[in-house]
Amino acid sequence: MDWVERTAKLRQWTRSGARAPHKPLLLLYALGRFQRDADGELPYSAVEADLKRLLAEYGPPRPTTPAYPFHHLVSDGVWEVRTRHGLGSPGTKVRELREEGAAGRLAPELRAALRRDPSLLGRMARVLLDLNFPPSLHEELCAAVGLELEPAEAERFATVRRQLRDPGMRGRVLEAYGYQCAFCRFDGMLGKVPVGLEAAHVRWWAFGGPDAVDNGLCLCSLHHKLFDKGVLGIGDGHRILVSQAFAGRSDAAREYVGALAGRAISGPGRGFSPVAAAHRDWHTAQVFRGDAPPAEAV
């Protein structure tokens, strides 16, 4: 059985490019727990808070519940749920999962395969990350679920990922935006080499976002991470949005984030296409965390 292929083909709700990373997040979490305790179960009542936090931080902006993936991942053959009555999930209602003492863990065949081939865990994790999240979030997501990937293995799969994507996109996007962050205008160079500048996909590559300038922004490392986390977005007139959910007490937080609200994006230069409305709308619906408050209220 090809577990990596099965991982890549998890059945997920999808419509018009909507994100539904519920199952991938649960499976990543389960792989992290297996790495620490190969024989342990995950009682729903004990892990509900962890799963809810992961969905809130890495899932789509719309409200959701960890009960859905806990129940529905069973249908993909990689997960099992037991209650005090035996094998089988009681459903998707939180109350039932709690009251029936539901506990989940990786399917027996998968656990056996992971014991036979320890490298399988890393390959499955990399597929889940690549197909559901932008690279800027991979490292912190692994830390959030307690996954430790071998450095050599992570580099090997990063090489594969670069071959799948257009390696020229970064250069084109940085050139289009004059080698400065479109949000804060940071333009660091080490000699003649740009530093701290990255090409951000507006519509994530994992969700059909093309390697094209009209789906890219030149952003500094900080603003790229905040853009992919939904703290920052793009509104009408290509003006910067700041999420109402963002809070920061320091002057730095106000200067580098809050003060961006309503500011026009810098670039791209003449001859280059600005961010396409379809990609901007996808990011607003699937990543950005809510409407922006008035600039004076940030």
Image (cartoon, rainbow, N blue to C red):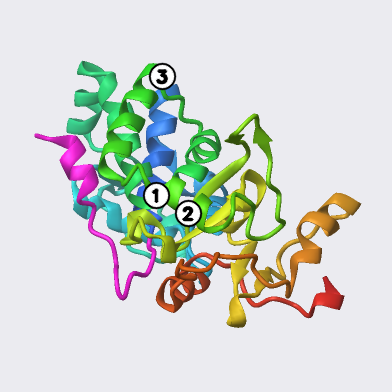
For the point 51% across and 41% down, the residue is 141
Identified by mark 3, the residue type is Glu
Q: Secondary structure at mark 1?
A: helix
The quadrant of the image that shows the N terminus is top left
Q: Residues within 10 Å of mark 3 (few under 14, many from 20)?
A: few
| Location of residue 121 with respect to 15 vertically, above or below | above
Q: Residues within 10 Å of mark 1 (few under 14, many from 20)?
A: some
Span colored in magenta: 1-20
**Marks 2 and 1, how far apart in space?**
6 Å
Q: Which residue is mark 2?
A: 173
For the point 20% across and 51% down, the residue is 9
Quadrant of residue 56 within the rendered picture: bottom right
Foreground residue among 90 and 244: 244
For the point 38% across and 17% down, the residue is 152
| Location of residue 41 with respect to 96 vertically, above or below | above
Depth check, mark 1 against mark 3: the one in front is 1
In magenta stretch: residue 78: no
| Location of residue 60 with respect to 146 vertically, above or below | below
Instruction: Point out the tag, 1 or 3, that comes first from the N-terminus.
Output: 3
**Marks 2 and 3, how far apart in space?**
31 Å
In magenta stretch: residue 12: yes
Q: Which residue is mark 3?
A: 150
Q: Which residue is mark 1?
A: 169
Depth check, mark 2 against mark 3: the one in front is 2
Look at the magenta stretch and give its main secondary structure: loop
